[in-house]
């Protein structure tokens, strides 16, 4: 492919019938060229042309180390998906999913047609929401110290010990409190999750973010995602709010966010040989 030719950048796949009813309003693509809809018999791909020299495999490896470039482009991708999610049932593709032209895109979509149409059926009328649970450990420690029977009993025993013995037993008590805090936060987060899970079609527990990633001083103790029927959205948020109020006094902060594109429930696994080495594609897979 010559230096003046383009790759295709794929944002998402959407049902053609929805895009026919509400034609895609073109927007500026990730490389400055207009994004457009390519219809492929029941499936519409939202794509834009990108410079093959800028988005070649070698060039991308270098640019992925440029945090300023990466943040700008990743945010563009995310915000583009949010806009699409307001209008359509969306199968979101990973950041920098690329193809060498429309023919190659059509080939790979055709190879995955059955899976794509199945996902459209699953995702229609649904939204994805996220729940993160943070904990003020000072508040939780106070709660555990005052309300856990074994800890309370041990704390009373300390009052009758000699200063030397009390010093060592205090250390053991502190360790006991830490262990009980871990158990209590795991139990409470699990209970909250199970209650919300009952209102969802699917759910998944994700890795917790560290403080640098979350930007919070409190530690994150739970991170889960839920695929909701739109009719269950209000009940889900009411349940989350009730949990927030119930557990606020012991240091838990329950924070819902959404609706999001179905990042976690729309995985496309490529068929064998669907994205060969050296094609410039970052595949139609998760």
Image (cartoon, rainbow, N blue to C red):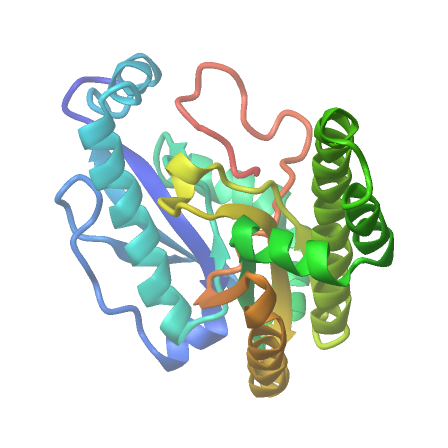
Q: Is residue 199 above or below residue 29?
A: below
Q: Residue at x 63, y 51 (%)?
A: 141
- From this view, report whether residue 204 is shown above or below residue 242: above
Q: Position of residue 139 (x, y in %)?
A: 55, 57
Quadrant of the rendering where the C terminus is positioned: top right
The residue nearer to you, when weighing 61 against 38, is 61
Q: In terms of depth relative to the viewer, which is nearer, 172 or 271?
A: 172
Query: In the rendered image, which quarter is residue 99 located in?
Result: top left
Residue 284 locus on image (x, y percent): 52, 39
The x, y position of residue 44, in whole percent, is 44, 60
Name the residue located 77 percent from the left edge and 74 percent from the top edge: 198
Q: Is residue 105 left or right of residue 146?
A: left
Please give left or right for residue 268 compared with residue 25 in the image. right
Image side of residue 90 versus residue 122, left or right = left
Q: Residue at x 82, y 43 (%)?
A: 160
Relative height, residue 167 to residue 237 (above, below) = above
> Can the viewer see residue 6 in this picture?
no
Tell me if residue 2 can be seen: yes
Q: How many marks?
A: 0
Q: Quadrant of residue 83?
A: bottom left
24 or 154: nearer the eye?
154
- Front in this rendered view, residue 284 or 83: 83
Image coordinates for residue 231, horizontal then vertical, percent: 61, 87
For image coordinates 28% across by 18% down, the residue present is 65
């Amino acid at each position: 492919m010559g230096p003046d030719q383009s790759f295709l950048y794929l944002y998402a796949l959407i049902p053609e019938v929805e895009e026919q009813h509400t034609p895609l309003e073109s927007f500026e693509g990730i490389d400055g060229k207009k994004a457009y809809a390519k219809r492929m018999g029941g499936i519409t791909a939202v794509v834009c042309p990108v410079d093959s020299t800028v988005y070649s495999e070698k060039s991308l490896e270098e640019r992925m180390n440029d945090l300023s470039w990466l943040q700008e482009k990743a945010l563009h991708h995310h915000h583009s998906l949010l806009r699409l999610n307001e209008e359509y049932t969306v199968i979101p593709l990973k950041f920098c999913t690329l193809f060498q032209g429309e023919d190659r895109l059509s080939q790979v979509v055709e190879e995955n047609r059955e899976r794509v149409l199945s996902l459209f059926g699953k995702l229609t009328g649904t939204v994805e929401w996220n729940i993160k649970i943070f904990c003020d450990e000072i508040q939780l420690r106070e709660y555990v110290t005052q309300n856990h029977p074994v800890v309370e009993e041990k704390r009373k025993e300390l009052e009758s010990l000699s200063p030397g013995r009390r010093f060592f037993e205090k250390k053991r008590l502190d360790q006991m409190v830490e262990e009980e805090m871990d158990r209590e936060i795991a139990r409470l987060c699990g209970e909250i999750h199970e209650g919300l899970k009952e209102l969802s079609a699917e759910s998944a527990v994700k890795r917790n973010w560290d403080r640098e990633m979350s930007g919070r001083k409190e530690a994150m103790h739970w991170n889960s995602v839920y695929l909701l029927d739109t009719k269950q959205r209000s009940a889900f948020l009411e349940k989350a709010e009730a949990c927030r109020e119930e557990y606020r006094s012991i240091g838990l902060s329950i924070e819902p966010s959404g609706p999001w594109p179905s990042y976690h429930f729309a995985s496309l696994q490529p068929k064998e040989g669907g994205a060969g080495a050296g094609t410039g594609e970052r595949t139609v897979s998760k």
